[in-house]
Amino acid sequence: MSVERNIVSCALTFCLATGTKEELDRDKIQHVVIESDLINIAKKQIAEDDHKAYWAALNNAMKSRDVSQIEEFISRYRVDDPDKLIPKAMSRIQDIKQSQTLFSQLNDVIYKISEKNHLEKVEEKREKKTGVIAAFERRKHRNKLAQ
């Protein structure tokens, strides 16, 4: 009944805003609202809009790699989950966390390989320098013996 009153109030406000001085018959307006099923149409439209908002929020959350955005969706629709998709969102959180863990492990492996390659190159350079120094020392020693 409050929705009906709001509709009647809107009609009255509209008439006042347009400068109409004619009085509206509230009973006729109420009758038209009831006969046209305007309240149910409005409720249906609101439900459809809410459902579209639900799907838009779900799509944004599922595309995101931000766990907090998905958690926000879950907390918002936990009580009223029309299509029962909260488990899917929760699964997405687990997938993201697992991916982050794997990514972190992969970075660790890459770092270790990089560090190993660096150490091998340093060792190769040291060995080359040692070989050059040894060759120089041998040459120097031969020159001394030759004198």
Image (cartoon, helix red, strand yellow):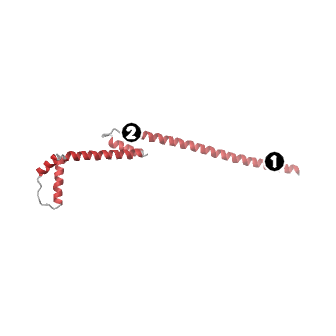
Q: How many tags in the picture?
A: 2
Assess disc 2: are there few (<14), some (14-19) or many (≥20) residues with their C-alpha within 10 Å of its C-alpha: few
Horizontally, residue 19 falls left or right of residue 95, namely left
**SS at circle 2:** helix
| Whole-percent x, y for residue 107 in the image | 54, 44
Q: Residues within 10 Å of mark 1 (few under 14, many from 20)?
A: few
Name the residue at 41% across, 46% down.
63
Q: Nearer the viewer, residue 69 or 15?
A: 15
Q: Quadrant of the N terminus?
A: top left
Tell me the kind of residue under disc 2.
Lys
Residue 138 relative to residue 107: left or right: right
**Secondary structure of residue under mark 1:** helix
Q: Looking at the picture, how far across and down is residue 37, in whole percent?
A: 18, 46
Whole-percent x, y for residue 134 in the image: 77, 47
Residue at left 67%, top 47%? Answer: 122
> Extreme right residue here?
147
Residue 45 in the image: x percent, y percent?
25, 47
The residue wearing badge 1 is 138
Q: Residue furthest bottom?
A: 19
> 40 and 93: which one is in front?
40
Residue carrying label 2: 88
Residue positioned 88% across, 50% down in the render: 146
> Which comes sooner in the sequence, label 1 or label 2?
2
